[in-house]
Amino acid sequence: MSEFNEREKGFETGFEISEELKFRIAARTARLFGLWAAAQMGFKDDEAEAYANKIVDLDLTKSGHSGLLEAIAKDLMSKGITFTQHRLTREMEALKFEAREQVMTGR
């Protein structure tokens, strides 16, 4: 194999690893955000887990993080919980850092 082909293969492998990490961090962020929202709505145990799973599915299948903000905002409003869009965005951003830390340390 030529040096160029070896370098190309190395870049491809690095890209695949990077994309997998991004995916895992995004999924973990959605889960943590779902658990946070569930706690705000007073969900406990199985109900909180089911809600978090719903949020992860929504993130992975349909809308990405912007859709999560909309879905969670709608759910919080339906429960009569007051919040600002800034608070939701700030919470999700903080959870991204936590998710990254968890994924990178294997927690």
Image: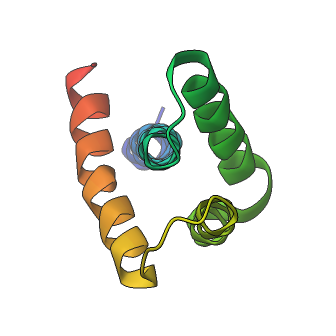
From the viewer's side, name the closer residue of 105 and 5.
105
Q: Single out the residue that lies furthest toward the front.
A: 80
Q: Position of residue 87 (x, y in %)?
A: 34, 74
From the viewer's side, name the closer residue of 59 and 52.
52
Q: Position of residue 92 (x, y in %)?
A: 38, 61
Q: Position of residue 3 (x, y in %)?
A: 37, 43
In the image, taking residue 104 as reference, residue 14 lies left or right, namely right
Up/down of 64 relative to 101, above or below = below
- Name the residue at 65% across, 45% down: 55
In the image, taking residue 71 as reference, residue 29 lies left or right, namely left
Q: Position of residue 91 (x, y in %)?
A: 33, 62
Up/down of 82 relative to 101, above or below = below
- Name the residue at 73% across, 64% down: 63
- Name the residue at 39% across, 42% down: 14
- Name the residue at 59% across, 72% down: 66
From the viewer's side, name the closer residue of 10 and 1.
10
Determine if residue 95 is in view. yes
